[in-house]
Amino acid sequence: MVDTIKKAAVVGLGNMGGAILSGIVSGGILPAEAIAGADKSEACRKKAERLGVVAFSEPKDAVADADLVILAVKPQSLDSLMSEIGSVNKSAVIVSILAGKKISTLEGYFGAGAKIVRVMPNTPALVGVGMSGISGNANVSDEELAKVVEIFSSFGKAAVVDESLMDIVTGISGSGPAYVYMFIDALIKAGVKGGMGEETAKLFAAQTVKGAAEMVLESDTSPEQLKINVCSPGGTTIEAVKVLEEQGFEDIVMKAVGACAEKSRVMGK
């Protein structure tokens, strides 16, 4: 454990904040008694309390003496949050998961000398297989950044990237689950159309996507080559791949990611 981070506060205990909180506790990164949470919702506070965490309705009560403050609220709530948060330990590491909010924007609120870490997680964090992009400003030490990586790795994987890449991170992993859900839904509908029951089609479709993703992660073989390996000449798979290629599948996905990244850039201005 990094000695300078002995107490953490999570502001916003909704789905993502709750996942972060659970990861910190279950991963043994900090003991529950060293963490405070804050949320206006009584239901969210009770969920946090079941983890052994003290939860407050007011952010200022949670962050008062925290060495690490994680902001897990909606981006549009930042202004109102800052009016409620009160004073924060000047040496505290401020971690933001607010989509589109740049480090410079947060420095405007907390001061140029503040330690700011920007994180883009994604919703599979809720089931322990999230992917988070992490970027810190020059005030954050390597040890402090490593602690943030450890926290976000407790419910999936995390990687440090330059902040200039955060918009494309948003396009690929932040919003990417939605594209994958669309693909899985299309596979399910094709299965039902072919005579499968919906639950059976869901199992076949989702497990196939999960297995293919694991092969990409566990293999040194490129996704392109893995595709080729499945496509036996004159076989069934190549017929499906031909249709996807003819319909511009790859181009459609790349355009979608680009549109998402551009929206992230606009939000950050």
Image (cartoon, rainbow, N blue to C red):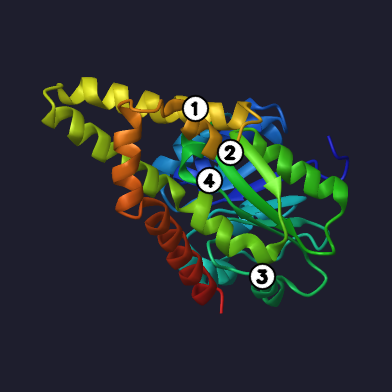
Q: Separation of disc 2 and disc 3 at Cα?
A: 22 Å
Q: Which residue is mark 2?
A: 21
Q: Name the residue nearer the viewer: 224 or 174.
A: 224
Type of residue at label 3? Leu
For the C terminus, the image quarter is: bottom right
Quarter of the view holding residue 153: top right
Q: Position of residue 96 (x, y in %)?
A: 62, 58
- Helix, strand or loop status at disc 4: helix
Q: Name the residue nearer the viewer: 148 or 53.
A: 148
Type of residue at label 2? Leu
Residue at image x 64%, y 33%? 154
Q: Report the mark closest to the observer, 2 or 3.
A: 3
Q: Which mark is residue 76?
A: none
Q: Separation of disc 1 and disc 3 at Cα?
A: 47 Å
Q: Which mark is residue 17?
A: 4
Q: Which residue is mark 3?
A: 106
Mark 4 touching mark 2, by CB under 8 A? yes
Q: Is residue 5 above or below residue 94?
A: above
Type of residue at label 4? Gly
Q: Which residue is mark 1?
A: 229
